[in-house]
Image: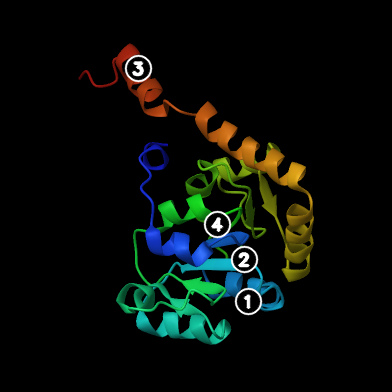
Amino acid sequence: IEIAEKFEPLPLIEKFCGDSKVMVAGSTWQEDEEELTHYIKSNPQIKFIIAPHEIDAQNIKDVQKEFAGAVLYSKLVTNSDPPFTANVLIIDNIGMLSKLYHYADITFVGGGFGEDGIHNVLEAAVYGKPIIHGPQYEKFAEALDLVECKAGIPVNNALALEKVLTELWNNEDLLKEKSEAAKKYVYSKAGATKKIMDYIQEKRLLIN
């Protein structure tokens, strides 16, 4: 919540997004990217921002191969005439993801197609964005809660992913409903640190 409320704009990201519909895919692994590939290639009118979980040189090259024509964020920074016409932007640095979700209409959180499960869904939810993710999310209380309140949407494969995205893009009321549910959930849980500290003090747990 603090990160979201202290949000500062990212000018290059704003220019890349323009007036287009935007999907941000954060903390993605190869398994996630494979499920996204067909939809991204089939929808050049939508802007996609992909922030891979691993940003070593080899993985970034692999992601570039997966999404031909994609531009790296580092190239936007160093290019005097950045290629904002591309529809896929690959983030090749660490630390931007929590701000990137601000620019999304719909988010995808990676990890859910791997054995370890999904990454941080709250980073996207706090901005009031619906979260799509893979089927491995049962170990994560926040993800379970978000699915229950209809802000989180698990999908099992690329076909299910495309169906959900088509439905959300074509139904503004549904998109708004899920967006509001996401933000409401996060803010309803605010103050956990204070509750924990009050409990510790009440139970005198720090006294030997």
Label 1 amino acid? Answer: Glu
Up/down of 128 relative to 160, above or below: above
The residue singled out by tag 1 in the image is 34
Q: Residues within 10 Å of mark 3 (few under 14, many from 20)?
A: few
Choose mark 1 or mark 4, whichever is in front.
Answer: 1
Q: Which residue is mark 4?
A: 118
Q: Nearer the viewer, residue 199 or 164?
A: 164
Q: CA distance from mark 1 to mark 3?
A: 46 Å
Specify the label residue 135 is tagged with: none
- 3 or 4: tag closer to the N-terminus: 4
Amino acid type assigned to the residue bearing label 4 in the image: Ile
Q: Amino acid at mark 3?
A: Asp
Q: CA distance from mark 3 to mark 4?
A: 31 Å
Residue 19, visible in the rendered structure: yes
Residue on which disc 3 sits: 198
Could you classify mark 4 by the number of other residues whose Cα lies within 10 Å: few (under 14), some (14-19), or many (20 or more)? Answer: many
Which residue shows up at 69% across the image and 51% down it? 153
For label 2, the crowd category at 10 Å Cα-Cα, with few meaning under 14, some 14 to 19 and many 20 or more, is many
Give x and y (percent) for residue 102.
49, 50
Q: Is residue 131 left or right of residue 100?
A: right
